[in-house]
Image (cartoon, rainbow, N blue to C red):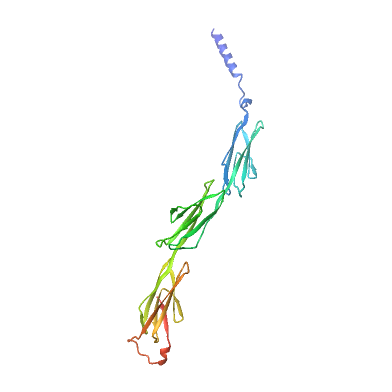
Amino acid sequence: NVQRRSVFIHIIIICFCLPGLDVGSTSTSNIYGPLDITLWGPDMVTVAIPASFFCFSQCSPACLYSITADGRSADTDEITIIIRERLNITTVTCTAKNNITGHTSTTHKTLQVLQGPENVSISGPAYLPVDRSQRFLCSAVCWPSCNYSWTSNGLPRSTSGNQLVVTPSAAVAIETLVCKATNSKSGIFASAVRKLFVTDGPLYTIIRGPDRIQLHSSTMFECLSRCKPSCNYTWTAENQTHHSKIIDVSVESWRESLTLTCTATNIITNSTEVTQKTLSVTENTAAPLRMNLMSAFVIALSLHFT
């Protein structure tokens, strides 16, 4: 009985081993595909921005892939493309081929081609007069469209569309405008920045200094003006011109009066304002008396900068 049981067991083992395959062989039941071929990647691409696509299918033992996009082909399951100019649509095509059976399957992906924002810019005046409204326009190359938002000196501004109206106050020296353009489809954005001087004046220009000047003595005068961001000053007297905010004036020959003229010029707007001051000339008792009669008709005016 023991011997018969042993033989029976060996027969069972042999029966289970017979259906097996040799090592390294492939069953025809394990060869399939390509099935369910899929092309992964975005549905939209933007001009000049790389986009990647990946092709996959159920395939045994393996599949070979070929992808065609933007006029070029590659024997690979992954491709990165860059569209150089805007088209209405472009197509990516993937073909999977079983490397044993030669069976193929193809899928397509139609892409919408977007553009921008590119070349974002802010147009408008070159400076901002105090308390005067100025309009600015933001533009960009954008397809199908862009949405626009603004900030002024870091604070968001409520506005509709690509226009902004700015009315600066005297408390602000520089206004920094930022326009952000965002593609309505892709969400890609770009910004433009403009820094503008807030300007005012010249206003209330005066010459500060005494109303009298002594003969042979040097006297200082200063030209003042309300000016934003600043002003340049030009003095004229007796056909002489000098550029400075402060001057020293000395009259060397007798005359009854001398008129000083100061012109204030805004460095940004070139707006000007002129003021004058007429000085009485008095004798300097400490100076020696001059008896030359011709000196009454000769004026020597000296202006010195400090």
Quarter-of-image position of residue 167: bottom left
Q: The N terminus lies in which quarter of the figure?
A: top right
Where is 137 relative to 4, above or below? below
Furthest residue in direction left, as rendered: 285
Horizontal and vertical percent position of residue 299: 42, 86
Q: Nearer the viewer, residue 188 or 277?
A: 277
Horizontal and vertical percent position of residue 305: 41, 76
Quarter-of-image position of residue 249: bottom left
Horizontal and vertical percent position of residue 177: 47, 57
Where is 34 relative to 240, above or below? above
Furthest residue in direction right, as rendered: 102
In the image: residue 76, left or right of residue 182: right
Furthest residue in direction top, as rendered: 1
Where is 67 relative to 147, above or below? above
Q: Nearer the viewer, residue 98 or 266?
A: 266
Horizontal and vertical percent position of residue 186: 54, 46
Quarter-of-image position of residue 61: top right
**Numbered circles on residues, count:** 0
Q: The C terminus lies in which quarter of the figure?
A: bottom left
In the image: residue 295, left or right of residue 32: left
